[in-house]
Structures are given as C-alpha cells and as structure tokens.
Image (cartoon, rainbow, N blue to C red):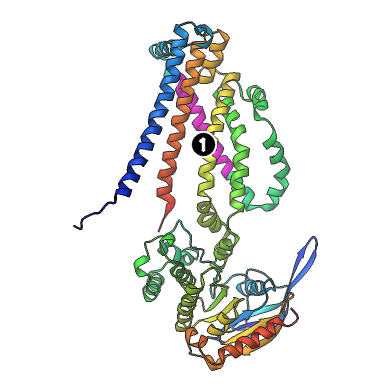
C-alpha cells in the first residue's frame, strides 16, 4: 500500500471546513433553544401576558392533555391524510390532464384562456361552494386542496412536456416511434424532474388547502384545533397546534425528498 | 439502394406569408454512394433531409427509394441528428437498442447484430455505462450504432459533427466514414463545413441561398477509397476547396 501523503494545507482546509460545519449546527441549536427559553422566561417573569402569548410549558401541557385524551393523533392523522390524498390526486390528475393537452395542441389552445383565469382566481373563494355541493366533511377539504394544486400542476407539467427537445422527438420519429411511444419513452422520462417538482410544490399547496378547508368546515384536524382554540380563547392550544403543524409539514416534505431519491435511483437508468 | 429526388419543392405556410425553402431539386444517389450537401446556413438543407427522411411531405415532387415513392418514415432510412441525443436515463445498451424496441423487433439475431457493432467499434465494454460517462466522440459513435441497429440501407446525416470540438471532429469523422463505408451504406450528409464534405464524400452538391436550388455538383470519384485524413493532405484537396468556396460565395 503506497504511503498517503497529505499536505499541511489539505489538513488545514479539512479542519476549517469541519469547524465551519459544526459552528453552523451549533448556532442553529442555540437559536431554537434560545427562542423557546426566552419565551418561557418572559412568560414567567410577566414581561408578556401568557394568556395571550402562551408559553412553551403551557403548550407542552396542552399537547400532553391532548395525547392523554387520545385526540392528538386523531387530529394530526386527519390533516396528514387529507394532505397526502390532496397532493397525490392533484399531481396525478394534473399530469393526466397535461398529457391530454400535450396530445392535442388544438385542445390546449382552446382551453388556454380558461386555465389562465382559473390560475389567477384565488381558489379559497371556492371553499363555500364546495361545502354546499359536496357537504361538510373531508371530501370538501380534499376538493379544496385539489382546487389549489390542480391548475398550477397542469400549467407546469404541460410546459415541461412542450419544452422536450424537438430534435429528440424528431429522432424518435425517424426510429419509427408512435405518439404513444414518444410519450412513454421520451416525454415522461425527460420530464421526471418537472413532475417531482410539481409534487413538491403540491405538498405545500395541499397543506394550505387542508388548513383552509378545516377552518371552514371540520370536526377534526389541525386547522379545526386552531379555529376552535381561538374561538374559546385557548391560545395555548392555538400556538401548540401551529408548532405541531410546522413539524408535520416539515417531516412530510422530508419524506418527499426521500421518495424523490428512491425514484431517481429506480428511474435514473434502465437498460 | 438508390435514392431519387425528383423536382422536389417545399413551401412553408405561415400567417405572415409563405416561405419557399426548397425549389425544384432533382438529385440521384447511387447505391453505396456518399453524397454531401453544402450550402449557406438557413438555405433549406435540413428541410431537404427531412423530406427524404419522410418527416415532411414535399409541396411538389417526390422522393423515390429503389423506384418506390416514400410516404412517412421507413425502416430503410436511418437518421443521425446534429447532437448524439443519447437519453441520459438509459444505459448505452438501452440507447443503441432503442430503435429495435420501438419497432418491437428485439429478436436475438438483431440484438447480436447490435452487440457485434458495439464490439467492432470499440464500445462493448461500455454497454452498461450511462451516456455521461463517455467522451463526445464515443457518444457520437453510439449515436451512429443506434441508427445502424435497425439495419437501414440509407443513412441521412444532419451536420453530425457540428457539436464536437475540432480535434474530436477530425477523428470521429474518420471513424464514422470507416463505419459507413465498411457497412456498405448509401449516405446523404448535410454540412456547412466544406473540408468535411470533401474529406468524406463521393460527390458534393452545392445549394444556393433560400429557396435552395442546386448550383453545382462536384464529382470527387478520384478520391474513392481514400480516407478522410489522407484526403485532407491530398494535393487536389485545396483546389476542390477553393472551387466549392467560390461556388458558395457567389452572390453573397
């Protein structure tokens, strides 16, 4: 085995890199711990009104009570389920419609102004309509998330499809490809990144739709807890739920990143 | 296989008016012949090639292959685009067998033919690699093998080396010339590089500015069997270059 010679410069470089990385992690921890500590101290010393602003210990107590009563995971699960159904349906339906538009440029031209109008419409305005049509329940909430994510998915994915290299399409045609083969063997794999991106954007949009929907109509869910808490002036419940929501949304996003990695490995190269 | 273009014209319609890209081109390519088409950029060279490939229908005139009029793409014709266009989500093997897959013709015999081509041109060790792991020249050879996999008799090359750097270009054009000659294919290449056209072909066809008409045809049959590299050093090379250059330059 040849002797590895590592220069002093290299050692210094690696060391400074490691130091920098550690400093970043440390500072991140200090910020979050400091924030909650300051909050707690301010509440205890009476600098802020704990009834209005709540405090970490009061929030922890609220969460513990929710857990004991068995409602905690009911609410988290409900909201997560609605979100997952929402972004999966939104991405799937949006992609299917984008395929239809790609297949027929004429149809796409006809529908263009409608998509533009629907895209600029604030979708939350449709909430009350869904409740009347579909009824007060999870179905209305999922309809809400679909309304928010569907149009933007169609536009993004369709744009991606259209920007597929025309020279590659030409090559496929000279090799005798049918339109269906061009779709499955070129357009879809070439736009894998576009579709994953749409999925990621839709996770965020779905959360907006779910919380919005739960504000309007629900008997369970994180949005329900927030509205209920504010109505009965239990700010501990409102604040605690917002923090749970932040954690749940962040975890879900991380799951999507893992899924993306796995899919990339699977689709990346096929022989 | 011979190709005959008879009074071929193509006019594009658009709301702003009509553009005549190709006007009354008649050209005959013998079996096993290598013909280059040179012309100023935007003169309609690629349009001509697309019509022979069956990707575009001529406004008037027709293309015949062995006396048979073509309509639509055909297995007899292979097309090689400007860049290699290997799909990054497929291995080299997945890429070179793409044509067979699309035509649902993955018989053992055909697959053997492809692996034979790969090993003959020094790529068999790379079958399971991804395109990004190969050099530009190797990728271009893979692109040619992808075209050859379906065993077309006629090859259409659309500025096949324009995306390569000069050095790679010289060696790849040498390689590809060898491959095309040894497989006995009929070839039609579009280029704007005069030296490339002289170094590879049996005839050079000079097109005019748009709408493209044939201005002159140079017969290089004295160079038959001489490799591109040797041709570039030949005494007569410069003479041909100047003649073609003058023909292109007229009226510019």
State yes or no: residue B214 in magenta: no
Residue A119 shown left or right of residue B78 in the figure: right
Rendered location of residue A10, percent (x, y): 32, 49
Front residue of A192/B72: it is: A192
Q: Chain of mark 1?
A: A
State yes or no: residue A94 in magenta: yes
Front residue of B25/A46: it is: A46
Rendered location of residue B68, percent (x, y): 62, 80
Residue B242 shown left or right of residue A92 in the figure: right
The stretch in magenta equals: A73-95
Residue A221 seen:
no
Rendered location of residue B3, percent (x, y): 60, 82
Q: Residue at 51% of width from left, 36% of height from top?
A: A88
Using the image, determine if residue A92 lies above or below residue A237: below
Q: Residue at 53% of width from left, 84% of height from top?
A: B199
Name the residue tied to disc 1: A88
């Amino acid at each position: 085995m040849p002797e590895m010679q590592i220069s002093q410069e290299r050692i210094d470089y690696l060391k400074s890199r490691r130091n920098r990385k550690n400093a970043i992690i440390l500072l991140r921890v200090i910020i979050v711990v400091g924030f909650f500590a300051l909050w707690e101290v301010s509440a205890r010393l009476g600098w802020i009104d704990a009834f209005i602003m709540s405090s970490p210990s009061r929030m922890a107590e609220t969460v513990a009570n929710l857990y004991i009563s068995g409602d905690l995971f009911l609410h988290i699960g409900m909201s997560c389920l609605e979100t997952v159904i929402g972004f999966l349906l939104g991405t799937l339906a949006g992609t299917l419609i984008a395929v239809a538009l790609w297949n027929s440029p004429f149809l796409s031209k006809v529908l263009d102004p409608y998509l533009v109008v629907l895209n600029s419409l604030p979708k939350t305005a449709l909430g009350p309509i869904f409740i009347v049509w579909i009824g007060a329940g999870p179905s209305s909430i999922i309809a809400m998330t679909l309304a928010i994510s569907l149009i933007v998915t169609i536009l993004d994915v369709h744009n991606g499809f259209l920007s597929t290299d025309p020279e590659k399409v030409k090559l496929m045609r000279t090799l005798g490809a049918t339109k269906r083969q061009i779709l499955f063997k070129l357009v879809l794999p070439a736009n894998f990144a576009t579709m994953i991106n749409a999925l990621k954007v839709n996770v965020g949009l779905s959360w907006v739709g779910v919380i919005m929907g739960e504000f309007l109509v629900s008997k369970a869910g994180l949005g329900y807890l927030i509205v209920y808490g504010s109505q009965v002036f239990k700010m501990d419940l409102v604040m605690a739920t917002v923090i749970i929501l932040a954690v749940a949304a962040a975890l879900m996003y991380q799951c999507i990143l893992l899924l993306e990695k796995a899919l990339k490995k699977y689709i990346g190269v096929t022989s | 296989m011979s190709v005959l273009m008879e009074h071929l014209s193509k006019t594009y319609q658009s709301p702003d008016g009509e553009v005549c890209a190709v006007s009354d081109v008649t050209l005959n390519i013998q079996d096993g012949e290598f013909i280059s088409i040179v012309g100023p950029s935007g003169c309609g060279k690629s349009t001509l090639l697309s019509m022979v490939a069956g990707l575009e229908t001529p406004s008037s005139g027709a293309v015949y292959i062995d006396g048979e009029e073509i309509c639509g793409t055909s297995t007899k014709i292979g097309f090689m685009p400007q860049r290699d266009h290997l799909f990054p989500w497929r291995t080299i093997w997945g890429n070179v067998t793409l044509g067979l897959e699309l035509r649902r013709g993955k018989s053992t015999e055909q697959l053997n033919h492809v692996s034979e081509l790969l090993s003959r041109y020094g790529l068999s060790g790379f079958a399971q690699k991804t395109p990004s792991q190969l050099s530009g020249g190797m990728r271009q050879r893979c692109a040619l093998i992808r075209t050859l996999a379906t065993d077309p008799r006629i090859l259409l090359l659309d500025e096949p080396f324009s995306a390569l750097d000069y050095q790679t270009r010289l060696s790849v054009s040498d390689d590809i010339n060898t491959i095309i000659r040894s497989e006995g294919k009929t070839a039609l290449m579009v280029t704007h590089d005069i030296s490339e056209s002289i170094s590879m072909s049996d005839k050079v066809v000079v097109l005019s500015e748009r709408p493209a008409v044939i201005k002159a045809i140079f017969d290089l049959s004295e160079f038959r069997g001489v490799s591109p590299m040797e041709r570039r050093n030949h005494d007569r090379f410069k003479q041909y270059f100047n003649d073609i250059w003058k023909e292109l330059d007229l009226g510019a």
